[in-house]
Amino acid sequence: MDTIYKSDTKRVFLTFDDGPSPVTSKILDILKQENVKATFFILGSNVDSRKDVVKRMYEEGHYLANHGYSHTYSKIYSSPQSVLDEYNECNDKVKNAIEVPDYNSHLFRFPGGLAGGKYAEIKKEAKEILLQNNIVNVDWNALTGDAETNNLSVEFEMTRLTETMESKNSLVILMHDAAAKSVTADALPQIIAKLKEEGYTHREIGEKFGLTKKQIKGFFSRYHRKQAKIDAGVTLRKKGRPPKDYVVSEQDKIAELKYILARKEAKIKSLEMENELMRDFLSLTERK
C-alpha cells in the first residue's frame, strides 16, 4: 500500500474515520451531489445504530474499510492479537449491515495511525498478524486538522489542508465522520472544489487497492510465499539479475529444498483433507 502515496498524476483519496455518525448522511449527500467517491474507515461500535447509513455508503459506491471496533486504545492495543480481533468484530458488523455475507475490505487503519506512540511495538507486531490474515493498513499524508482542536472552523480546516498538501501528487486525506467534528461536513464542498481546481482526480481506495479479487489474492499469495521462505531460512535475493560472482551457499540450497518440501507437504495435506471430505460426502449420500 506504500505506492498509494506515489503517483505521476494528481489524485486524491478522501478518507473519513470513526463513522457512521449523525453527520454521515450530510457527508454522503455532498459526495453524491459532487459525484465523488470516498473511503470510510468504519468503527464497528457505531454500526448497529446506523445500519441503514452503512448500507447507503456501500450502495452509493464508497469503499467501506475497517477502523476496529472500540477505538479504545487500552483495549485494541492490549495485544497484537486484539487488533485482529477488533478488525474481525468490525467486519462482522459491516457485512451484517450491508447484507453481504462474504464482505471483507482487507483494509485497516490503526486508530491513531501506525507510527509512534506508547503502543508502537504492539502495532508493529499487529501489522504482521494482519498481513498474515490478508489485511493491509493505510495511514494518511494530508489532513484537515479536525482532530487537532475543539474550536474548529471551515477556515482552520482549509488552512491545515493547504499546509499538509504541500506539493504532493497523491493525497490520502484524513478527515473524521463524527458529531463533534461536523464542521468537516460544512467544509467538504470547499475541500472538493479546491482539489478539483488544483487538478486532482478523486478516487476511493477500493479503486487502488481492491480493483479485482484476483489482484488481492495475488498480493497475499506473494506475501505468504515470501513469509514461508523466511520461516524456512531461505535468504531472499533482491529483485533483478544477480551479480556475476553470486554463489548460492549450501545452507541456502538446503533451506530452499526445505521450503519446497514444506509446500509439497502442505499440498498433500490439502488433498488428503479434500479426499476425506469427499468420502464423508459420498457416505452421506449413500445413506440417503
Image (tube, rainbow, N blue to C red):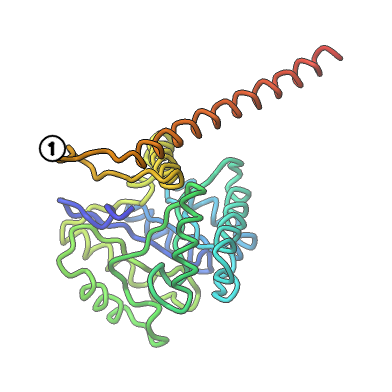
Q: Residue furthest bottom?
A: 151
Residue at 57% x, 74% y: name it.
72
Rendering quarter of residue 99: top right
Q: Camera-side residue: 86 or 132?
A: 132
Q: Camera-side residue: 231 or 49?
A: 231
Task: Describe the element under mark 1 as helix, strand or loop.
Answer: loop
Give the vertical position of 34 relative to 69 (above or below). above
The quarter of the picture where the C terminus appears is top right
Q: Position of residue 222 (x, y in %)?
A: 38, 39
Give the vertical position of 268 relative to 117 (above or below). above
Give the vertical position of 169 relative to 277 (above or below). below
Q: Position of residue 52 (x, y in %)?
A: 58, 54
Q: Residue furthest front?
A: 250
92 with respect to 166 (left or right): right
Q: Residue furthest right?
A: 287
Residue at 59% x, 48% y: name it.
95
Q: Position of residue 119 (x, y in %)?
A: 48, 74
Q: Give the tally of numbered discs.
A: 1
Categorize mark 1 by other alpha carbons within 10 Å: few (<14), some (14-19), many (20+).
few
Q: Position of residue 63 (x, y in %)?
A: 43, 51
Give the vertical position of 219 relative to 33 (above or below). above
Q: Which amino acid, by three-letter code, is at mark 1? A: Lys
284 with respect to 184 (left or right): right
Residue at 26% x, 77% y: name it.
160
202 with respect to 272 (left or right): left
Rendering quarter of residue 103: top right
Q: Camera-side residue: 282 or 189?
A: 282
Residue at the spot of label 1: 244
Residue at 22% x, 62% y: name it.
195
